[in-house]
Image (cartoon, helix red, strand yellow):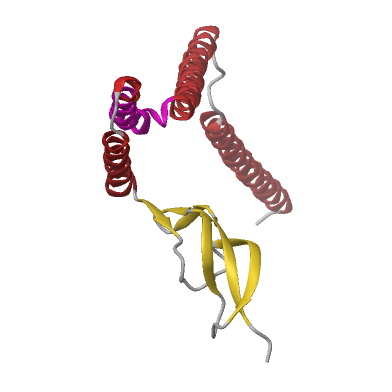
């Protein structure tokens, strides 16, 4: 083969090699551009759509509605609480003002009987009749207070002295083994198990040996 033919063949091979490299670079660039395009498309797809004026307005309207509903519930709760507090205060005041109404109503019968006894005493000639009437009223009153209101009288001569329920207003030395009531000046009263008035008594104390 002649030198000219060899040179021409070499030149042709070099040209084909350059063309091949150019094609490879072009394909690589195209692949890179395609990947970048896909990444951009994916990024755009992941980004949320910008809210519109209409959507923002609707959201604001929904929030305002929700706010108004909560405000209405809160105001109703406050009003209910205030009404409850006023009602409780009124009931407490009524209990204070009229708590004794039942007792007073039950005492009216005894008051009526006392009025009749006083009227009868004005023209009575027999003291025993008046005394019997007063005794009857006393028994009726005591029975009502004991049975209906659990009011119990206590304190009688000879009872053992108890400083928790008796108030000693005097004492004497006596031939007794332990302190006892020598005299009762004022009866004591218990409401159920609670002392509401201590009995005022004279106490007989054991003599010192």
Main SS, magenta residues: helix
Tell me if I can see residue 163 in this picture: no
Q: Is residue 7 left or right of residue 190?
A: right
**Residue drawn at (34%, 50%) of the image:** 150
Q: Is residue 148 left or right of residue 87?
A: left
**Residue drawn at (48%, 53%) of the image:** 187
Q: Range of the magenta residues? A: 98-117
State the quadrant of the C terminus.
bottom right
Residue in front for this viewpoint, 129 or 141 = 129
Q: Position of residue 47 (x, y in %)?
A: 56, 29
Q: Quadrant of residue 174?
A: bottom right
Q: Quadrant of residue 118?
A: top left
Q: Position of residue 169 (x, y in %)?
A: 65, 59
Whether residue 22 is situated above or below residue 99 in the rendered picture:
below
Residue in front for this viewpoint, 206 or 28 = 206
Q: Position of residue 69 (x, y in %)?
A: 45, 17
State the quadrant of the N terminus.
bottom right
């Amino acid at each position: 083969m002649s030198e000219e033919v060899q040179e021409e063949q070499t030149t042709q091979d070099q040209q084909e090699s350059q063309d091949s490299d150019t094609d490879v670079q072009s394909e690589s660039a195209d692949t890179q551009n395609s990947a970048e395009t896909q990444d951009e498309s994916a990024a755009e797809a992941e980004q949320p759509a910008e809210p519109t004026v209409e959507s923002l307005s609707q959201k604001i309207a929904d929030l305002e509605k929700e706010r108004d509903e909560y405000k209405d519930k809160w105001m109703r709760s406050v009003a209910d609480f205030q009404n409850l507090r006023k009602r409780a205060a009124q009931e407490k005041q009524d209990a204070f003002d009229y708590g004794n109404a039942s007792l007073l109503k039950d005492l009216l019968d005894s008051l009526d009987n006392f009025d009749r006894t006083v009227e009868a005493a004005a023209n009575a000639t027999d003291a025993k009749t008046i005394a019997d009437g007063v005794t009857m009223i006393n028994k009726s009153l005591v029975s009502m207070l004991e049975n209906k209101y659990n009011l119990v009288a206590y304190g009688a001569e000879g009872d053992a002295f108890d400083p928790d329920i008796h108030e000693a207003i005097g004492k004497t030395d006596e031939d007794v083994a332990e302190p006892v009531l020598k005299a009762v000046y004022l009866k004591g009263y218990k409401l159920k198990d609670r002392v509401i008035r201590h009995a005022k008594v004279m106490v007989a104390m054991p003599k010192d040996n």
